[in-house]
Each structure stands twice: as structure tokens, then as C-alpha cells.
Amino acid sequence: MKLKTNFFALFLFFTFTQVAVSQVNSHYWSHQYGARGLLLNGSIIASVNDETAIFYNPGSMALTEEFGISLSLITPTYSLLRTTDFLGEGTSFSNQGLDLSPGLVAAMFKPFGTDKITLGLTTFKRFKSEINVEDRTVSQLESDSDQLFLGDLDFNRRLSENWFGVGLSARLSSKFAIGFTQFFTFRNERVGLNFKKEILDKNNPANLIAGWRSNFDYGYSANGGMLTKFGFCWAPDFAKVGGTFTTHTYGVINRGANYAFDDQKIAFNGGNTSSSNDRSVELDNYHTPWSLGLGVEIPLDGSMLSISAEYFTQIEKYNLIDDVDDPLDGLAANSELTTVKIGQANGRVLNVGIGIERVWKKKYTWFYGFRTDFSPRSLFDLGEGITFLASTPNIYHLSTGGAYSYRKSQFSVGIDYGFGFKTGGKQLTDITEISVENIFEFSGEDSVNTVVHQVSIYITYDL
């Protein structure tokens, strides 16, 4: 039996997803939680003073006097991603939708009858994405040609990652505390893509001159992974300082993967090929970065200025799926083994958040925030030297809103706007250059432009 690398469907899939998908998957600061986290745009590593400290900085838990339940109730989010020149000059497609961003529930309390120890519990959705894109292109190959080009795309992707955490914090003095949160993560992802490229006789469109149809589906799960976050908080009279260290995901309890493809090519010279498979396999590996965070809170002319930064390390290239299989189970006389490799890597990232809050009439507080959400420039590797950079835009967020406090409860409302823009992305193909000779090839200019808009409304309630 021969060994054959089956990269045609994977090539197509990863080239497409570089502009359509990874803005959610690969951005580490996509979602914030709680009133202060949302309204100050995540700049609260030092200044967090509510139950969301279990996530932002477990070292702050023992220094806060606020105990109860924090709820991020409703966060409707409208997002728009528009890409131009992806299939050639003058082409474009958009993906837009209205959904609810991930929320959080967290609670803290004092166990053991002592004020020096604080225990916390939380559950929240760290990532949530569901993208569906359908596009159809029909064009005449040349002005004097009797051939038409027909191209179809049908893409869908679902991603979900839930975190559950137990936090413990110890107050070592009235100004200094340390803590950690043990998280358990559950990640599931599935992607499906149907693609068709056909050259038809203009005078008799039922006559297929050449064509390529490829269906691809892949998914994986990494459930029961562990991730630990350590933190400290120092609160002298003149400021607050906080720091965190977050480990990579380790000790995944249950993991698996599967893929399926069905690929058919009809060539102009009469040579036809077909290949397909459907396999459940072991998830070869799964990695997340470790990170370091640092924050300060400084009084500033009647307001409070919060600044935070978090550095995420680089993830070297590794394989999510690495499988060799005979799709025909040895029954064919000349069976060919197919090798499916899906690799990925992420670059290092440094994100920064800045927030200002100002109390007005004691019960009301106004918030303003800014944060970066830089893309880690994910790399997808399909083997045999075939690599693609999933370079999505860096996104910049601005937020504002207000909070009303009554006794020990607080109700908050705010809005956030995120914007990203990137030029120079790789085209999937250039439909103006397609012919019967190159229909099975992918080539194009570095001329793809991608714009991202996100608008979120925050409604939170702290009991």
C-alpha cells in the first residue's frame, strides 16, 4: 500500500478559517466578567474588589469586605466581520450575528470561623462561538470565453469552553494577601466545511467540464483539564498592586477527536479521483499558554485609575490530530494510506487595560475603560511544509457605563465597542485567474482586508 498525504480538504479548511473564525478562538482577552471587570475593560488585576476576584486575582479575595454573589445577567453582543477580496478582487463576504456573550456566577464566603481565610466558587463560559457562512460565486472566466465558473462555500464552526473554579485566599496582614484558584476546563470544538469549484459549459451548463467537490468535518474535545491561577494583592494607603501567574492546561482527563472528508475531482482530461474517510481518533495533544499579569490602582484627583497588563507565552507548533489510516480497510487491491495532520501554534501576546472610575453622589459611579485584545497570530500546519498564518485583526475596546449601589447590592449597566482592521491577508483563490489547468490549485495575492466590529451591552447585579 502507498502512503499518501491527504491535505486537500485541510488546506482549504485552514486557509478559509484564517479570516472567518480565529478572531474568537485565538484572542485571550475576548471576554470580561462582573461589573468592574466589564466597565473597566479588564484592568482590575489590582483593583478587583468583588466575587470576580476568583478569576481576575485570587490574592484579592481575602482583602475585600464584599461577600455574596456576582451575576453577569445579560450581555447581548452584536458582531460583524467583513472580508474583501478573499475569492479575488471585488469579492466580499460578511458574518454577523446577535448573541449573548458568556456570563459568570461567583460567590465568596468565610469558612472556619476566621476573617483571614476566604473561599470562593465560580462557574463561567470562557469561550463561546458559533459561526455560519454561506457564499456562492458565479462568473464568466473570460469576456470571450464559453466557460463559467461556479463556486460554493458552506462553513460552520461551534466552540464552547466552560470553566469551573474553587478559590482560596489567605490574608497575611491587613495590607497583603495571597491566593489561588483551581480551575477545571471543558472544551469542545467542531468545524464543518463544504466547498465546490466547477467549470461549466456556458451554452450547456449541465455539461461539467472540470470540477472539485470537497466536504470536510473535524472536531475534538479536551474535558476535565486543570489550570491553576496564583495571585497576590498588596494594598498600602497610597495605592494597590496585584500580580498573577496562570499555568497552562494540564492533566486533561478525557479527550478525543474525529475527522471526516469526502473529496472528488473531475479533470478536464478525463482523469477522475475520489477519496474519503471517517475516523474517531485520539486527540494527539492540547496546549494553552501560561501567563503573567500585573496591575496597579492609583488615586487620581478624586478618581481611581486602574492599569493592568498580562503576558501570554508562545506555544510551539504541535499536532492536534496525527493519524495514518487505510480508508478502505485493506480490501482494495491498491489501497493508499492517508495521513491527516492538523497542527497549530500561537505567538506571544501582551495585552493592556486602562480604566477610570469616579464616584458621583455616593451611590453612583461612572466607569470608562480601554483594552487591547491582540491576536496571537495562530499558525496552522498541515505537514509537508504547508503552513498558514491565521492572522486575524488586533481588536481595541472602549467601554463606559454606570453603577448604582444600594446597601450591599450594586446594579450596573454599560456598553463596549470593539474595532479591528487588518490588511494583507492571503486570498483563498483568485476567481479571475481560474482555468481548467489550475482548478485544483489555490493561489492568490496578499490583498485580503478584514474588518471587525463588536458592540456589547452589559447588565450585571452583585448581591
Image (cartoon, rainbow, N blue to C red):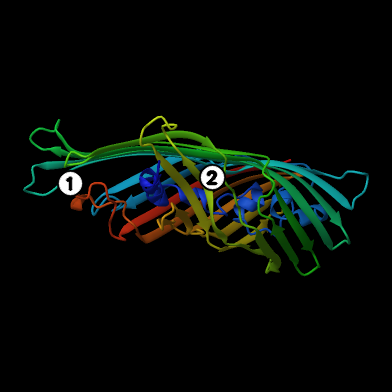
Relative to 137, is 382 on the left or the right? right
Q: Residue furthest right?
A: 113
Relative to 328, is 412 on the left or the right? right
**In the rendering, which numbered label is found on residue 141?**
none
Q: Which residue is mark 2?
A: 457
Tag 1: residue type? Answer: Val
Quadrant location of the C terminus in the rendered image: top right
Residue 28 showing in the rendered view: yes
Q: Quadrant of residue 13?
A: top left
Residue sitting at x 51%, y 59%? 376
Q: Which residue is mark 1?
A: 436
What is the crowding at mark 1: few (fewer than 14 residues within 10 Å), some, or many (at least 20)?
Answer: some
Image spot of residue 227 (x, y percent): 69, 49
Image spot of residue 346 (x, y percent): 53, 58
Q: Nearer the viewer, residue 194 or 381?
A: 381
Per the image, label 1 sits on a secondary structure element best described as loop
Tag 2: residue type? Answer: Ile
Residue sitting at x 47%, y 57%? 379
Image spot of residue 330 (x, y percent): 43, 32
Q: Nearer the viewer, residue 123 or 158?
A: 158
Relative to 231, is 32 on the left or the right? left
Residue 189 showing in the rendered view: no
Per the image, label 2 sits on a secondary structure element best described as strand
Q: Quadrant of residue 234?
A: bottom right
What is the crowding at mark 2: few (fewer than 14 residues within 10 Å), some, or many (at least 20)?
Answer: many
Image spot of residue 339 (x, y percent): 44, 45
Disc 1 to disc 2: CB gap under 8 Å: no
Residue sitting at x 53%, y 45%? 457
